[in-house]
Image (spheres, rainbow, N blue to C red):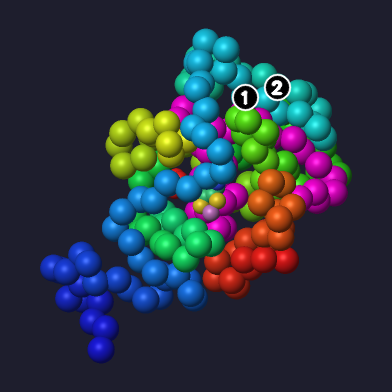
Amino acid sequence: MFDFFHRERSDLRTVDPARVPPGQVVTQKWPVLHYGGVPKVDLKTWDFRLFGLVEQPIRLSWAEFQRLPRMTIRCDIHCVTRWSRLDNTFEGVAVKDVLELASVKANAKFVMIHAEKGFTTNLPLDDLLQPNVLLADTHDGQPLTPEHGWPLRLVVPHLYFWKSAKWVRGFEVLANDRPGFWEQYGYHMRGDPWKEERYS
Ligand SMILES: Nc1nc2c(c(=O)[nH]1)N[C@H]1C(S)=C(S)[C@@H](COP(=O)(O)O)O[C@H]1N2
Ligand SMILES: [Mo]
């Protein structure tokens, strides 16, 4: 039988089953998954844009982004392809702080995330406003590697990891939901791993 007191003391490889959503298998590695190639990014021309249903459209340079207040989260990753990676540390800027810069309009309900090379993913605004949702540039104390999204990726710990867009470049605030890249192929519009919202 599972004994979490023993695990806390000694056995880091013993996994608390309550932390693993249905249908998931825990891995110690961090797989790399994305469509297409790893984009080449130039920080001199990089920007992050907030547009759509906002009072004040915003364009942040990399230097401006670096000046925003930072925070660290510890979270588990759950990929729809059935691997989970526990205890990740990400550092970056809280998404709710970034959205506040633009002040979203009263009828805003959804956000389309835009990343390099036209990758998109959609999610409800309420999910993005959760306090531990981050625009992250480090993982476990190191700068993100290019294949994991350097210079900046979204991290939405409570949804399947395909919502956590790598190489993110902007948020488009919307009144009505619209499917992003994987969602157009049938992936779920929200993607809660605890409800196994894999496909629509
Ligand atoms: N820009 C971009 N972000 C993306 C993807 C992608 O194809 N392009 N794939 C998503 C998917 S399906 C997953 S599972 C995670 C994988 O992140 P990782 O490679 O850091 O594990 O990135 C997500 N973010
Ligand atoms: Mo994925």
CA–CA distance between discs 2 and 1? 8 Å
Residue 6 picture location, percent across and down: 17, 76
Specify few, some or many for label 2: CA neighbours under 10 Å numbering under 14, 14-19, or 20 or more: some
| Residue at the image point whose x is 76% and y is 23% from the top | 57
Please state, as top left, top right, bottom left or bottom right, where the N terminus lies in the image: bottom left
Query: Is residue 134 or residue 189 the one in the foreground?
Result: 189
Residue 26 picture location, percent across and down: 36, 66
| Residue at the image point whose x is 63% and y is 47% from the top | 128
Callout 2 touching callout 1 (CB < 8 Å): yes
User: For the view shown, which residue lies furthest in the top direction?
Assistant: 44
Residue 198 picture location, percent across and down: 62, 66
| Residue at the image point whose x is 52% and y is 28% from the top | 39
Q: Earlier in the sequence, mark 2 or mark 1?
A: 1
Reading the image, the residue beneath label 1 is 48
97 on left or right of 16: right
- The dot on residue 58 is 2
User: For the view shown, which residue lies furthest in the front direction?
Assistant: 36
Residue 132 picture location, percent across and down: 51, 48
67 on left or right of 127: left
User: Disc 2 marks which amino acid?
Assistant: Ile
Classify residue 3 by image quadrant. bottom left
The residue stretch that appears in magenta: 150-179
Residue 161 is a magenta residue: yes
User: For the view shown, which residue lies furthest in the left direction?
Assistant: 10
Residue 16 is a magenta residue: no
User: Secondary structure beneath disc 1?
Assistant: strand
